[in-house]
Amino acid sequence: MYKSLFFALLIGFALFNSACNREDSSSVEQDRIWQLHEIAYDAETDKTIARSSFKFSNAFGTALELVDNASAEFNNDLLDWKPVLAHYEREYAGVVDSGTFVYNDLDGNTFTNVINPINPIAFSSTQINDTIFKSAAYELFWDGIPLEENEYVILTVNGDNEGDARIVTQTDIGASSIIIGTDKLEALPEGMARIEMERVILLDLDEGNDVGGNIQGKYKTAQIEVMIRN
């Protein structure tokens, strides 16, 4: 599981780092195009975004814009190119927790990848508006099934000061809670803080070319507020 999380973080860094460098897909061999497909639901906005990214060779490669007859679809909808972020996406109202991505390359190959229903996550109603004391680690239980294989949870807690956000991860299969240690809490100012959790599943593609790729699902909670005390 740590390997999956580490790879997911590498993917995130690679996508951010390579967005400024891009070419069109006709400039590379089609079997060297790496794929990443993702659905991400955010309960704060009640929207789902379906995304597809294409890179040369691997996650760290040059971002590619599909040209001519190449295309990216999700659930039969064409995804739109977003030049600033160098990926394809489409927004949907509400929860879209599963679906089918289809990528057509310039050699006439079609790659179909299905993401099954992603597991939701929510804050336990008993811990909303809770008070957290810096002097002791705080264990937060979520509503939702325990972590399964290839899943992890990221918790972000953010106080009122600029730059004081702290991130905690849970990667243990079977876990149903996450612990905010005193090392994280001590960095937060006293007062109200905002917390959110995101549940992620990262999988290999069902259908890929020589360099493969990944498919992932994300489910993010709405933010809650807690009181931080010494």
Image (cartoon, rainbow, N blue to C red):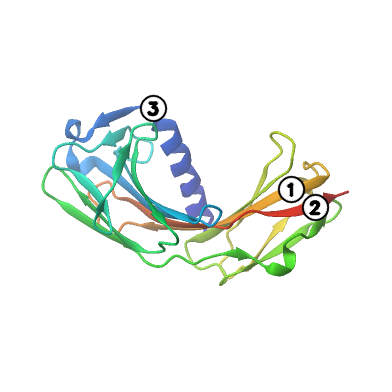
User: Does residue 17 lie above or below 80 as drawn?
Assistant: above
Q: Nearer the viewer, mark 3 or mark 1?
A: 1
Q: Position of residue 122 (x, y in %)?
A: 60, 64
Residue at 45%, 60% in the rendered image: 94
Q: Position of residue 178 (x, y in %)?
A: 67, 61
Nearest to the observer: residue 103 or residue 58: 103
User: Does residue 81 lie above or below 114 as drawn?
Assistant: above
Q: Is residue 127 visible?
A: yes
Cα–Cα span, label 2 and label 3? 40 Å
Mark 2: few, some, or many residues within 10 Å (few <14, many ≥20)? some
Nearest to the observer: residue 173 or residue 37: 37
Tell me, for residue 110, which label it has, or none.
none
Q: Nearer the viewer, mark 2 or mark 3?
A: 2
Residue 77 left/right relative to 87: left
Q: Are marks 3 and 1 in contact (CB under 8 Å)?
A: no
Asked which secondary structure carries label 1, the reply is strand
Tell me the residue that label 1 is attached to.
193
Nearest to the observer: residue 223 or residue 31: 223
**Within the image, what quadrant is residue 26 found in?**
top left
Tell me the residue that label 3 is attached to.
20
Q: Inspect the image, locate mark 1, and give the three-letter code of the amino acid beneath it.
A: Ala
Cα–Cα span, label 2 and label 1? 6 Å
Asked which secondary structure carries label 3, the reply is loop
Cα–Cα span, label 3 and label 1? 34 Å
**Within the image, what quadrant is residue 173 found in?**
bottom right
Mark 3: few, some, or many residues within 10 Å (few <14, many ≥20)? few
Residue at 21%, 45% in the rendered image: 71
Tell me the residue that label 2 is attached to.
227
Marks 2 and 1, the one that precedes in the sequence: 1
Residue farthest toward the front in the current orientation of the protein: 93
Q: Inspect the image, locate mark 3, and give the three-letter code of the amino acid beneath it.
A: Cys
Marks 2 and 3, the one that precedes in the sequence: 3
